């Protein structure tokens, strides 16, 4: 599988291979949002395990409405910024690049120590129940429609968080425009029913993510990686599809990419499945639509799957999620032909914390995470 283990240039970064750790919520930070030694060892173990690039879990951006979960890490304050530095140093010392994912919870917020009130593009209640393994219970709140001042506050939060990430030593940031969080909600006809400059048809609904991309890029300069994660499905609606089909999808991705992004990160339930019932996958559509690298994520467990997607030209980098939780050294195991441990949802019981993963490893006699 030479393509999977070839080095790859992502802007100024030279990655040792094309295996990426996908962002995964772990609700394991301190109550006030600081990264800790447990997180340092957790991320450091993936870097030691051979991943070329790590993308962090969604990290909240301001002390207003962005926090989505209790014990979610933040990078809104200087104290939060400084607590990330040892984590970044551990990842870099083990030879991997590190991207911080910036997230605003929006309507899918389950826990916020700063505000009990939740905000979103429009007052639309998410479907289904909150995620118990992230500490939620019962139905989601009906959010308040954001005022112009709150939208500007959210934009400023992304910008300040990106500056903090740069100061903490990260190689770049990923703007979370997927899975039903705020930037995705502004792009969605289901959640964005506004009639002002932030709403309208599918092109008009790109206004907020485009503004965030441009202002973040201006703040961090050209030498810092800025990417964006996109999906059709949401945490609250796994079957959701973008309206407009293939052509509108290609235009949406191209418009975002050309606003100043260095990569697109496409996540779907199955990275190789047709995006709209038949035809190309969303990753493959992105590859034909944008001039920047495409990371693909979704149900990729084996080296054969990863190599197939790369060799068919559907993506440039492969993001591994649940399979990486079962195997922090997934790249090394795949390269050596060693057996892989299947992901077990028991790791998420009663919550998807790093501590519960460690307890599962001890109970099942699996190798522990390597300390940094």
Image: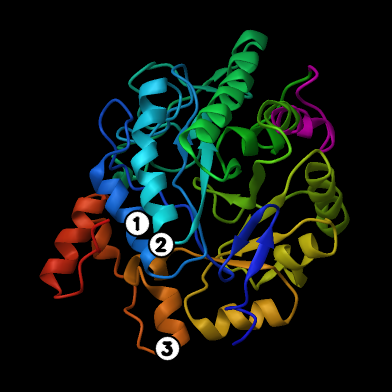
| Whether label 1 touches label 3, CB < 8 Å | no
Magenta span: 196-213
Q: How many discs appear?
A: 3
User: What is the secondary structure assignment of the residue under circle 3?
Assistant: helix
When the figure is inspected, residue 152 is found, relative to residue 339, above or below; the finding is above
Location of mark 2 (residue): 47
Q: Can residue 237 be seen from the camera position used here?
A: yes
When the figure is inspected, residue 75 is found, relative to residue 283, above or below; the finding is above
Across and down, in percent, residue 202 comes to 81, 38
User: What is the secondary structure assignment of the residue under circle 2?
Assistant: helix
| Whether label 2 touches label 3, CB < 8 Å | no
Q: In the picture, residue 157 is in which quadrant? A: top right
Mark 3: few/some/many CA within 10 Å (<14, 14-19, 20+): few
Colour mode of the rendering: rainbow
Quote the CA–CA distance across marks 1 and 3: 21 Å
Q: Residue at 35% of width from left, 56% of height from top?
A: 44
Q: Residue at 72% of width from left, 62% of height from top?
A: 282
- Residue 202 part of the magenta segment: yes
Q: Can residue 125 be seen from the camera position used here?
A: no
The earlier-in-sequence mark between 1 and 3 is: 1
């Amino acid at each position: 599988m030479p393509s999977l283990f070839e080095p790859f240039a992502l802007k100024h970064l030279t990655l040792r291979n094309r295996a990426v750790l996908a962002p995964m919520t772990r609700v394991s930070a301190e109550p006030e949002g600081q990264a800790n030694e447990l997180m340092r060892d957790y991320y450091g173990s993936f870097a030691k395990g051979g991943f070329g690039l790590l993308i962090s879990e969604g990290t909240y951006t301001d002390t207003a409405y962005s926090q989505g979960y209790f014990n979610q890490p933040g990078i809104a304050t200087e104290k939060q910024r400084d607590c990330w530095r040892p984590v970044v140093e551990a990842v870099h010392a083990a030879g991997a690049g590190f991207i911080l994912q910036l997230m605003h919870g929006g309507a899918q917020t389950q826990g916020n120590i700063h505000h009990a009130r939740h905000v979103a593009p429009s007052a639309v209640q998410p479907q289904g129940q909150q995620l118990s393994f992230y500490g939620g219970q019962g139905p989601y709140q009906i959010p308040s429609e954001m005022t112009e001042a709150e939208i500007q506050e959210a934009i400023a939060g992304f910008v300040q968080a990106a500056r903090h990430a740069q100061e903490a030593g990260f190689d770049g940031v990923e703007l979370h425009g997927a899975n039903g969080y705020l930037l995705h909600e502004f792009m969605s006809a289901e959640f964005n029913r506004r009639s002002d400059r932030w709403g309208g048809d599918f092109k008009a609904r790109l206004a907020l993510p485009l503004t965030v991309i441009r202002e973040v890029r201006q703040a961090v300069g050209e030498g810092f990686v800025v990417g964006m994660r996109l999906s059709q499905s949401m945490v609250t609606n796994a079957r959701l599809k973008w309206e407009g089909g293939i052509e509108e999808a290609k235009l949406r991705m191209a418009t975002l990419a050309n606003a100043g992004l260095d990569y697109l990160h496409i996540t779907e339930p199955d990275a190789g499945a047709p995006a709209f019932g038949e035809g190309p996958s969303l990753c493959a559509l992105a590859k034909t639509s944008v001039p920047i690298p495409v990371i693909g994520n979704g149900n990729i467990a084996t080296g054969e799957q990863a190599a197939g997607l790369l060799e068919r030209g559907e993506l440039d980098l492969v993001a591994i999620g649940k399979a990486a939780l079962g195997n922090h050294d997934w790249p090394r195991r795949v390269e050596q032909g060693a057996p892989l441990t299947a992901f077990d949802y028991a790791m998420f019981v009663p919550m998807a914390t790093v501590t519960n993963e460690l307890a599962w490893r001890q109970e099942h006699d699996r190798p522990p995470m390597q300390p940094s």
